[in-house]
Amino acid sequence: MYTQAMDIPDDSGKKLAAVSNAPSEQEAAFEARIDADGRIEPQDWMPEAYRKTLVRQISQHAHSEIVGMLPEGNWISRAPSLKRKAILIAKVQDEGGHGLYLYSAAETLGTSRDQMLEGLHSGKAKYSSIFNYPTLNWADVGVIGWLVDGAAIMNQVPLCRCSYGPYARAMVRVCKEESFHQRQGYEALLVMMKGTDEQRAMVQDAVNRYWWKCLAMFGPPDADSPHSAQGMRWGIKRISNDDLRQKFIDATVPQAKVLGVTLPDPALKWNEARGHYDYGQIDWAEFWNTVEGNGPCNKERLATRVKAHNDGQWVRDAAQAYARKQKERALKEAA
Amino acid sequence: MSTPIDYLLHLADNAVVLGQRNAEWCGHGPILEEDMALANVSLDLIGQARLLYQRAAELMGGDATEDKLAYFRGPHEFRNYTLLELPHHGALVGYAAADRDYATTIVRNFLYSALMVHVWDGLQQSADPALAAIAAKSLKETSYHLHHSRDWLVRMGDGTEESHARAQAAVNHLMPYTEEFWTTSPAEGAAVAAKVAIDVWALRPAWDALVNDALAEATLTRPNFHGYITEGKIGLHSEHLSYLLGEMQGLARAHPGATW
């Protein structure tokens, strides 16, 4: 799924401004590559701040995929048909796969998956705040596909052109799968809207709860976005938060009409002069409060990830012990 | 030749119930790769269940559908092996709660897939071409499930002291439930008589060999059988199935007639 604009500061970025002692020749080559819109690869020299920004952004993205498995996973056991159950399992599995590619992409920058997980589990590293809201009815699954994945695609398609090669390449596959999820989510909602009054009410309820949260996924307004300018300069970020948000709204309003749901914003209306939809005020205080850990599900999400990791320690230990024994046996045989 | 419906339901219920159990790990696995592996196993099983229910619904006619069969039958109508409905932990009553234990999950998947590779292999020759086709597809999937669970069984058994103890406890807990494989239910008897199914009893030596070989490699001991032979496949289940079905069927049953 799902990045929120990947410029949410967290503790791992504190040393961002560290001065690099690299020779200016290397720095010049790096800058020239960036200016030429070329790709930076793992073996290339890169400024420490570029590396750290990428590790922060890619690991936040990976963590978002993994934490994002929980709100949708919440409905797997109760999916109302076998077809929908299979679709949902496959989707949540895809998110796990995205987590894997992204952890691997971040590992090319010299940070291990264990280190990144430690960041998540200790609360130092952030993940997309959209997953700190509960999934309260079955339609939430469809709405997450349509709106949350839809917003993520807007954020992520430009990342396919990101200056860092492994991240850009991972995003190509991620985006293809997300587009599929978005269409599946929308299709599930179309079926529900053609169904009973209760089904339609479920869809509207889910849209009401998720609409504003999805708009906030694009991150703070450009004026308040701390890392955006440097990210743009480095080719890590390509389009501003506000521009992406507007693009998302403009694309979504007609889809909502076809679906027959009302987007919960009385200020939402077409502005002929701007050629865009105008929209109301996002509650940024609520957004930041949730990012800071005070949303409805932050504690549950994180504690669940930590518990799965801790409970699984003996399994990982067993695999390592067995691999060690096998290696020793092979050595003994060879001797 | 078509397959007796009760036999199709037995195969389908096995798949849906174990698929439901495996999916419970989604987001909670011991390592990300295992979350994905178990989701994959679950997807395969749900897929098998769908094909089998669809075939059963086709033979039943009327308003039968795969979802009516999965969502609108009660626990006493389910024909799955009791082994498959058990929660992922040791022996506890239906309303007890305990942490999931990955060894229980792996040992169960191993014992069941070690049977089903032989069952699906035999059913490829079923006189019912629809069942033979489902068997061919399922055999490929089940071979992977066997591979996956056997690998982990060996790692756990021959891993650390803790993993060995957990794997042995799971084997001790679950092995008695496999006795149910070897009794013949009326549905199985009818399917064998109609030449659409194979006699499971005949598969026992092959299953024993597979299981004994894996347990030996895992340095685990096979317990002697003693005790009660479960009868899930004739509709007499443990206390656990009604909880599983209550959760699985609740939403669908709250909206009967709705399309999803």
Image: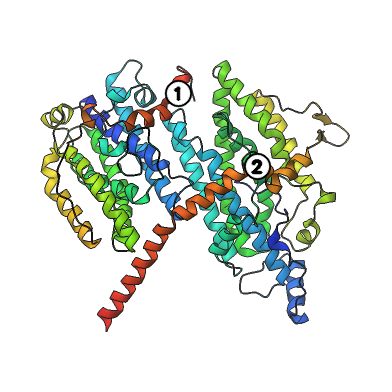
For label 1, the crowd category at 10 Å Cα-Cα, with few meaning under 14, some 14 to 19 and many 20 or more, is many
What percent of the width, then of the height, locates residue A333?
A: 25, 79
| Residue position for label 2 | A130
Asked if labels 2 and 1 touch by Cβ distance under 8 angstroms, the answer is no
User: In the rendering, which numbered label is found on residue B252?
Assistant: 1
Q: Which kind of residue does numbered mark 1 sit on?
A: Ala
Q: Residue at x 57, y 64 (%)?
A: A115
Q: Which of the two residues, A94 or B252, is positioned nearer the viewer here?
A: B252
Q: CA distance from mark 1 to mark 2?
A: 27 Å
Where is B169 relative to A235, above or below? Answer: above
Q: Residue furthest bottom?
A: A335
What percent of the width, then of the height, locates residue A64?
A: 60, 50
Q: As drawn, is B133 to the left or to the right of A214? A: left
Q: Residue at x 14, y 35 (%)?
A: B183
Q: Residue at x 53, y 63 (%)?
A: A114
What percent of the width, then of the height, locates residue A56?
A: 66, 60
Q: As drawn, is B132 to the left or to the right of A248? A: left
